Amino acid sequence: MKILTGGKFRELDLYTIEHEPIASIDLMERAARALTDELLAHWLTDDQRIFIFAGPGGNGGDGLAVARLLAEAGRVVTAYLFNVTGKLNEDCATNRDRLLATDAATLVEVTSELVFPELHPEDFIIDALFGTGLSKPLSGGFANVTKRINQSPGTVVSIDVPSGLMCEDNTFNDTSSIIRASATLSIQLPKMAFLFAENQRYVGDFKLLDIGLSREGLDAIKTPFWLTEEAEMRAMLRPRPRFAHKGTMGNALMVTGQRGMMGAAILCARAALRAGAGKVTQQLPSSCLNIMQVAVPETLTQLDIDNDIITTALDATPYQSMAIGPGLGTSRHTAAALHTYLQQQACPMVLDADALNILAEYPDWLNELPAESILTPHPAEMDRLVGHSANSFDRLNRVRHFAEARGVFVVLKGHYTQICTPTGDVLFNPTGNPGMATAGSGDVLTGIIAGLLAQGYLPAEAAQLGTWLHGLAGDLAAAELGEESLIASDLIDYLPQAIKQTKWKQTS
């Protein structure tokens, strides 16, 4: 699913109006009916007072149309239309006149001072002040209105975008003047700002409402930003070959763990096996052999000459993929082994955790990253590589540049994990939940991706599919165990179910 910038949404609206064809006022009515149906079905009670705050543009027009439809459905509606300049959007003005003609709702047209209504906890507030066209922070009277709405005790739902929130970059926004909604009912497609952690307090939960904007027009608009969809993952997941054996399903080399830090190595190895790798070979300090053989008896082992840490690089040419970093440590001897592996460029590589911390200490080695390597940092690890970021949008721009400049994939972990590609595309992953914020979850992801690479998945496929399955396993685990009780090994236990569910839908 494409993610469009605010300006691109206007292009899509205009394309739909011209090519459907449909008058803009009728397209607004279509959106209003979708919004009204959703509000009546899932949000409003029969005797609830409804207050709608509408701005002078298209978003305000949506709000006035919703006010009329709700009033016609028998609800008690008061709409405040802010017309302080005397210049309303044409469709907004039309919906004002339609609302006045119904006599079913109360309309207060604000041209100067607003007498703010007294709101109660049981009241319902619809924010329709500003939408995707906003290009600067709210100030003056509009800023005061958003603050009053935020102080009110009622439930607040925003239409399309919480007023005051920019669709992408909010670095220089006045955060005190952004509506804090319980939910946002967004038209057709998600806005990028919805997918950043710091904006959740404004957006709340969001739901997309399909109003039939032109598919042809959407296909014609170019964007580097995408939200991964289930159908894409179904198509990407390969059936197991009928004549497969362990030799044809790949051997993944795990360069993970050290004495006292074998949990990460165990999780990574188990995840690679559960993801379908034919074999997993674990490079180990000699003191860690018994732990691995007991915890994951399916693994093969290669012992390092050191008793406690990894100090030497194996010949990686017999392997189809490599995972390096979880639990590894950052000793200079371990760092030297990592450097040798980078120089070998023998097989597709997933770098995580301490591998990334070592690269932050030796930034010149970034020039030796094999093409299409996959890095799986959390935000703090990424900041150590590219510098401190002011917010999620700033970090995304830095990571995009890093991925393009280095020719690698970066899987930036978090809710809506962002997969940045060497071509500059960004894919936001929608699976996963807060229960996965637990130690070892990232080690499982590294193992899954390495297991897919071992089977011959291309790096682009392994990064996307591995992230999707990782999150889906977390969702399945949380549904049964609860988010609070979820631990990293649960992700591995539910990974077969995640793969099976995807394959079942693929063949159904």
Image (spheres, rainbow, N blue to C red):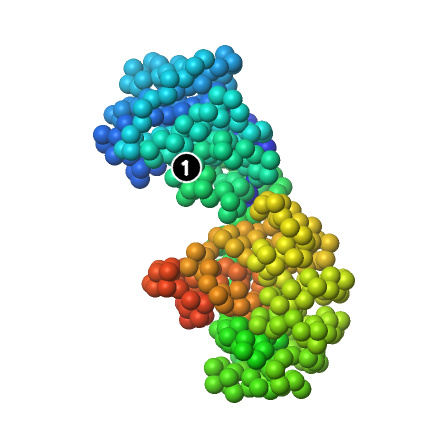
- Could one spot residue 492 in this view of the protein? yes
Local crowd at mark 1 within 10 Å, few (<14), some, or many (≥20)?
many
Q: Residue at x 45, y 28 (%)?
A: 146
Residue 490 location (% of width, % of height): 41, 68
Spot occupied by residue 258 in the image (x, y as percentages of width and height): 59, 78
Where residue 305 sits: x, y (%)? 67, 86
Residue 28 visible in the shown view? no
Of 212 and 146, nearer the camera is 146
In percent of width and height, residue 301 lies at 58, 85
Q: Which residue is mark 1?
A: 181
Instruction: Say which residue appears at 46% left-offset and 59% top-offset.
Output: 437
Question: Which quadrant of the rendered structure holds the C terminus?
Answer: bottom left
Residue 222, quarter of the rendered image: top right
Q: Secondary structure at mark 1?
A: loop
- Residue drawn at x 34%, y 13% as measured from the top left: 101
- Identified by mark 1, the residue type is Ala
Q: Residue 65: name its quadrant.
A: top left
Q: Nearer the viewer, residue 263 or 64?
A: 263
Residue that protrudes farthest toward the left in the picture? 47
Is 133 placed left or right of 112 in the picture? right
- Nearer to me, 143 or 392: 143
